[in-house]
Each structure stands twice: as structure tokens, then as C-alpha cells.
Image (cartoon, rainbow, N blue to C red):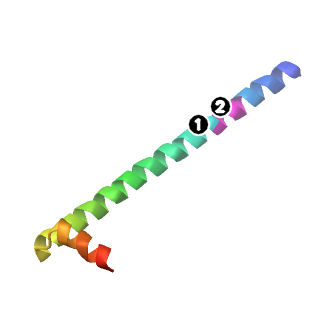
Amino acid sequence: MAQYFFVAADSAVSTMFWLVGMGVLGFVLVGAVLWGIAYMILHLVRKFTGKDEQTDDVEYAEE
């Protein structure tokens, strides 16, 4: 009985660690993808509007 309990506990712990690990990895990957998409959109908008990054920063600082 004790041996079965330890096997079950070990399985549960490893499953928990796997789920947590996959959750963290998934969160990081999704965050990186979303950040990359947002950065590309921002870059394209700045490119097409002809705004320079420095002038953007100055405008934000004045507000």
C-alpha cells in the first residue's frame, strides 16, 4: 500500500511539474509572439507615418 502511494505521489508531482512547466513555457512563447507582432506593427506604423523614434519619445516626455 505504501509503495503504491509513493508511486502515485511521484506521478502526481511529476505531472504537476510538467503542467506548470508547460504553462510557463506557453506563457513565455505567447508573450514573445504577441510582443513581436506588436513591435512589428509599431515599426510599420512609424515607418509609414514617417515619425522618428526620438521625436516620439520627446512627445511622450512632454505630455
- Side of 52 where 8 appears, left or right: right
Residue at coordinates 25% horizontally, 77% vertically from top-left? 59
Q: Position of residue 22 (x, y in %)?
A: 52, 42
Residue at coordinates 47% horizontally, 48% vertically from top-left? 26
Magenta stretch bounds: 11-16
- Side of 24 where 34 appears, left or right: left
Which of the pair 41/50 is nearer the observer? 50
Q: Is residue 44 visible?
A: no
Queried whether the magenta region covers residue 39, the answer comes back as no
Dots 1, 2 in contact, CB < 8 A:
yes
Q: Which mark is residue 31?
A: none
**Callout 2, which amino acid?**
Ser
Label 1 and label 2: CA atoms lie apart by 6 Å
Q: Could you tell me which secondary element the residue under label 2 belongs to?
A: helix
**Callout 1, which amino acid?**
Trp
In this rendering, the answer to whether 34 lies above or below 21 is: below
Q: Which residue is mark 1?
A: 18
Which of the pair 5/17 is nearer the observer? 17
Q: Could you tell me which secondary element the residue under label 1 belongs to?
A: helix
In this rendering, the answer to whether 59 lies above or below 20 is: below
In this rendering, the answer to whether 25 lies above or below 58 is: above
